Image (cartoon, helix red, strand yellow):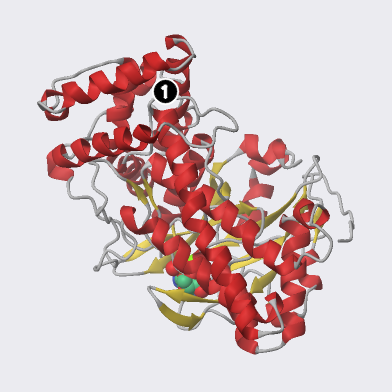
Amino acid sequence: MTDKKTTVDAGWNFDNSYAELSDIFYTLQNPTPVREPKLVVFNALLAESLGLNAEALQGSEGAAVFAGNEIPGGALPLAQAYAGHQFGYFTMLGDGRAILLGEQITPQGERVDIQLKGSGRTPYSRGGDGRAVLGPMLREYIISEAMHALGIPTTRSLAVVTTGQPIMRESEQTGAILTRISASHIRVGTFQYAAGRGELDELRALADYTLERHYPEAVENAANGENRYLILLQEVIGRQSKLIAKWQLAGFIHGVMNTDNMTLSGETIDYGPCAFMDAYDPATVFSSIDREGRYAYGNQPYIGAWNLARLAESLLPLLHEDKEQAVKLAEEAIGGFTEQFHEHWLAGMKAKLGLFNVEGEAEPEPEDEELVKELLKLMHKHRADYTNTFKALTFGNWQNTALFEDAEFDPWLQRWQSRLDRQEESKEASQQLMRDSNPAVIPRNHRVEEALEAAEKDGDYSVLERLLSVLANPYEHTAEQEEYCMLPEPSLLPYRTYCGT
Ligand code: AMP
Ligand code: MG
């Protein structure tokens, strides 16, 4: 990849490697300027880590750039083409309301996409207006930043601007644009798009580009004669199995795991109707459009495997010239997902219970998984709060909850305690592991709603800023966080989310 440098005061250092792919993968497209850009949230720490000058971008210059009214030097705005399975049905998609400004090369030499979401119509907009509404953009900002702080790979949020232009939805809404930062925006759907065109050279170019951008070491370390496209598939399966295990461990429900919303980099992307589970129930669904529970909490690993099978299908012509052989290789790779997911999940669950995973250990104590499952069963029975239950176990805080009063809880506790006693590590080390594995705070739905409401109705961003600062250190377990651990009033349940539009 070339390393063209264009540095201006704000610290922009763009390269545009994606635009070097065939132009079937994108359309050059500028954002549509907006009337009255106003910067309402800005991530100064993230800006600095990207090599940007936070001070220079904090004011009107930032507002102009993040609104798409001004194109920074070196940027090459474009909309990406892609397809995808939405709720199981294949559709042609593409960036209908997002524009990639370019790739910022950070001081550490990393390459990240800078994308404006809500920046106007593109050739892929179909019937849409190309715009986004303030509430959902703030929601993506809060949740993606919370995910990052929780240690879950994710796209990040640099800024939100309001546009000064009302947006027509069911009612009139405030228009806004989110600046999203990501390792790339290459999706399973990008590969489906390439494969669907039936031109092997295009598919190969996309796969080579993705390997170079996200998996250079894997290619370098490959044994002689190993198929690099099989490596690509295996690497993505590896990252996605780890990612989805982290979602499960944190109680995160993505809500719209369409194949266009699954990245090749292994980052979480597209915060539409996502939400964190409160009462533990694998059938939990928040999204109003997911009527059949396709993307329910407990289904996420299966959907992950399903989506990766769509990636594997797209890669078939590159895996082997003999179709049967190709299918066999793809199936083997996909089969590895379940196993890897389970390993990451169990290791994570053990850590949540203060049980150390011994490096090189062939098998965890077989009863460990039973211990985890029995706890989850009890939590399900009492619809115990997922986050607070693990927090209570961390601090030995047996509140008067139905779960802890269940006759079956005491024997479970005894078994857990004797398992803890059997391991070499000290009680302190074990508690530290639990503190580091069980967040005190997650973006609780009623807290997120409260922050959005103050911003949308009164232009008051202080509630949101405070929420962001609490969510920035989820494993600190401070007194200040306590009020953010509290559950919503029953009148606010059941919680529903709507697709971010
Ligand atoms: P999403 O549900 O956010 O993953 O979006 C699915 C597809 O719809 C993507 O191709 C988006 O670019 C497109 N889309 C969503 N909202 C709009 C909009 N307001 N205008 C144009 N395209 C949109
Ligand atoms: Mg999407």
Q: Nearer the viewer, residue 206 or 131?
A: 206
Name the quarter where the N terminus is drawn.
Answer: bottom right
Name the quarter where the C terminus is drawn.
Answer: bottom left
Residue in the image at 66% along x and 53% along y: 183
Residue in the image at 48% along x and 50% along y: 341
Q: Nearer the viewer, residue 64 or 476?
A: 476
Query: Can the viewer see residue 434 in this picture?
Result: yes
Counting labels gives 1
**Dot 1 alpha-carbon crowd within 10 angstroms: few under 14, some 14 to 19, many 20 or more:** many
Q: Position of residue 382 (x, y in %)?
A: 14, 37
Q: Position of residue 56 (x, y in %)?
A: 72, 40
Task: Locate residue 351: give its quadrant.
Answer: top left
Question: Looking at mark 1, is its residue's CB closer than 8 Å to ligand 2?
Answer: no
Q: Position of residue 40 (x, y in %)?
A: 51, 45
Which residue type carries mark 1?
Gly
Residue in the image at 51% along x and 62% along y: 335
Vertical arrangement, residue 187 with respect to residue 249, above or below: below
Left or right: residue 423 versus residue 35 is left
Query: Can the viewer see residue 130 in this picture?
Result: no
Vertical arrangement, residue 239 with respect to residue 117, above or below: above
SS for tag 1?
Answer: loop
Task: Locate residue 396: give its quadrant.
Answer: top left
Left or right: residue 246 versus residue 172 is right
Q: Position of residue 9 (x, y in %)?
A: 82, 44
Q: Nearer the viewer, residue 441 or 321?
A: 321
Left or right: residue 178 versus residue 10 is left
Residue in the image at 22% along x and 25% along y: 412
Vertical arrangement, residue 213 with respect to residue 322, above or below: above
Please name the residue that numbered disc 1 is placed on: 354
